[in-house]
């Protein structure tokens, strides 16, 4: 049950937050630390520090560390990482699909050239 909750929370975080990884930190605190109390604030601060030092986007690294800790290992980290990336992946896939469909439209061509 915790894995489903982790997936849904990080799917929400990935879908409703724009502005990059640092913009996600307050929402992650609000949900993971305050609302669900899966980890404490000290652990969260440590995760942010480690996420900054680890190569890659901070939001993905943070989701991975939280998932590993709360979701009891690698499966939790995989689930949270997929969940936080999935909304962006779906959005980009839809944009590419529609761009391919309308690539010959004169308005789209003019928009992309300017």
Image (spheres, helix red, strand yellow):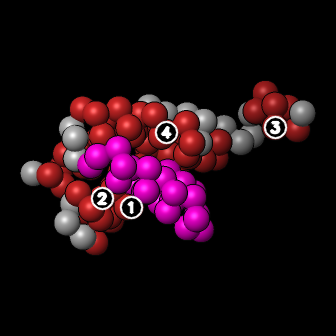
Pointer 4 residue: 24
Judging depth in this view, the residue of 58 and 53 nearest the camera is 53
Q: CA distance from mark 4 to mark 3?
A: 30 Å
Question: Answer yes or no: do the residues labelled 2 and 1 have beta carbons within 8 Å?
Answer: yes
Pointer 2 residue: 67
Residue that appears at 48% across and 53% down: 48
Where does the image place residue 95, in percent across and percent down from the top left?
58, 41
Magenta extent: 39-63
Pointer 1 residue: 64
| Residue at disc 1, secondary structure | helix
Residue that appears at 88% across and 38% down: 113
Q: Looking at the image, tell me whether mark 3 or mark 2 is earlier in sequence order.
A: 2
Residue that appears at 66% across and 38% down: 102
Where does the image place residue 28, in percent across and percent down from the top left?
39, 40
Q: In front of the other: label 4 or label 3?
A: 4
Would residue 8 appear left or right of 23 to someone viewing this image? left
Q: Residues within 10 Å of mark 3 (few under 14, many from 20)?
A: few
Pointer 3 residue: 112
């Amino acid at each position: 049950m915790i894995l489903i909750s982790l997936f849904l929370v990080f799917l929400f975080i990935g879908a409703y937050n724009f502005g990059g990884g640092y913009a996600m930190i307050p929402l992650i605190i609000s949900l993971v630390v305050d609302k669900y109390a899966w980890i404490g604030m000290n652990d969260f601060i440590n995760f942010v520090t480690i996420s900054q030092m680890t190569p890659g986007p901070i939001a993905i690294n943070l989701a991975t560390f939280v998932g590993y800790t709360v979701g009891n290992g690698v499966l939790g980290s995989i689930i949270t990482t997929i969940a936080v990336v999935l909304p962006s992946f779906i959005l980009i896939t839809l944009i590419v699909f529609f761009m391919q469909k309308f690539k010959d439209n004169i308005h789209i061509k003019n928009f992309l050239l300017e």
